[in-house]
Amino acid sequence: LLRLLLAQVCVHSAMTGARLAAPLRALQLGQSAAEIGVLLALFALSPVLLALPAGRLADRHGLHLPLALAVISATAGTLLAALWPNFGVLCVASLLTGAAAGTAQITLQRHVGRAATDTADLKRVFSWIAIAPAMANFLGPLAAGLLIDHAGPQPGDELGYRAAYGFLALLPLVCWLLARGAPRLPTQPAPAQAAGARTSVWELLGVAPLRRLLLINWLQALAWDVHTFVLPLLGHQRGLSASTIGVLLGSFAIAAALVRVLLPLLAARVPEWQVMYAASLTAAVMLLLYPLTAGPLGMGACSVVLGLALGAVQPMVLSMLHQVAPPARQGEAMALRVMTINFSSFVMPMLFGSVGAVIGLSALFWLVAGAQALGVRAIPALRQVRPPH
């Protein structure tokens, strides 16, 4: 599990490092704000388009083939940007590294879920594997930023960007070295696949508990995105410094990672639906209180509690999703979750900007809090979920 966790950290860090380097390089090249927005959107667009094919590939072939394709994609994207760091190549690199991170996430999550021995073990392994994106969000940008500033003759020199992308190109190779020895688990083709028929994603969405889990997951992503998007604007509106806003965002991220370290201790004692219920209610309350806090200390307390609440939801969703999906289509179910999150990250910031301009930043928090509170009603129905036999 540790080797697979570190493998996901490596391939995901290649994407997060590129996500930092790409807009900075584009600014240096004189691209407009609109062009930079498109560049950043491409990181989320490719996982939306490729998640289902990646999930189906994982269901048919297991871990190694889709992970190898993800490694090739991430290495190719970052290596191209290291060799030709112009805007067109940066767009290609964004698509390739985004696709690689999404494919690796789906494949690795499916694999560790199938390797789990029981429901308590499911909660434990998904709590640990959910730490990987948080670690990558820290390590990838840190490494890229340090190389951009210090690898060239001057900070921000083109040589620094080439070095940053060159280093990021090595990380997917480390991912492959870590994961290639993972045991091959038997695949279980669906009856429709065995008969040569084409399976439909709508059949999968016909599973009611799966639809509820995707709704809960989307609401969690919505709350996460609104906090990430609105907090800098709210902090600027209140006269907070950039470093203070950075500390607030950092405290949220650390809390979300910390709760995933602690969740395995609860895994054998508390059912998933109870964790999701308590976490979703807590998130709704924090989103209601956030705009009412006067200073950075109050906002910091809300950030930490909100991070703890939202960080606890994803591992529980992954565990239950693995249980409610048909065994032969677990990769496809994981893909639907990745599609939901990335589509939200692609669309919602633009929607937040438009809606926030009309109703105000505080009302935007309260609107999402209301959506969280309404979504809580779908959670108790999941108490009847039992693992498929």
Image (cartoon, rainbow, N blue to C red):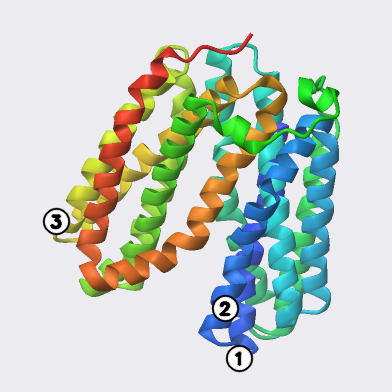
Bin the neighbour count of mark 3 within 10 Å (Cα to Cα): few under 14, some 14-19, many 20 and up.
few
Q: Is residue 281 left or right of residue 209?
A: left
* Residue 292's disc number: 3
Q: Earlier in the sequence, mark 2 or mark 3?
A: 2
Bin the neighbour count of mark 1 within 10 Å (Cα to Cα): few under 14, some 14-19, many 20 and up.
few
Bin the neighbour count of mark 2 within 10 Å (Cα to Cα): few under 14, some 14-19, many 20 and up.
many
For the residue pair 84 and 297, the one nearer the viewer reads as 84
Camera-near label (2 vs 3) is 2
For the residue pair 190 and 294, the one nearer the viewer reads as 190
At x 57% / y 67%, what residue is drawn?
41
Q: Earlier in the sequence, mark 1 or mark 3?
A: 1
Q: Mark 1 to mark 3: distance in Å?
A: 40 Å
- Give the residue at mark 1: 30
Q: Is residue 158 above or below residue 278?
A: below
Name, please, the residue furthest toward the top.
389
* Residue 56's disc number: none
- Give the residue at mark 2: 36
The amino acid type of the residue labelled 1 equals Gly
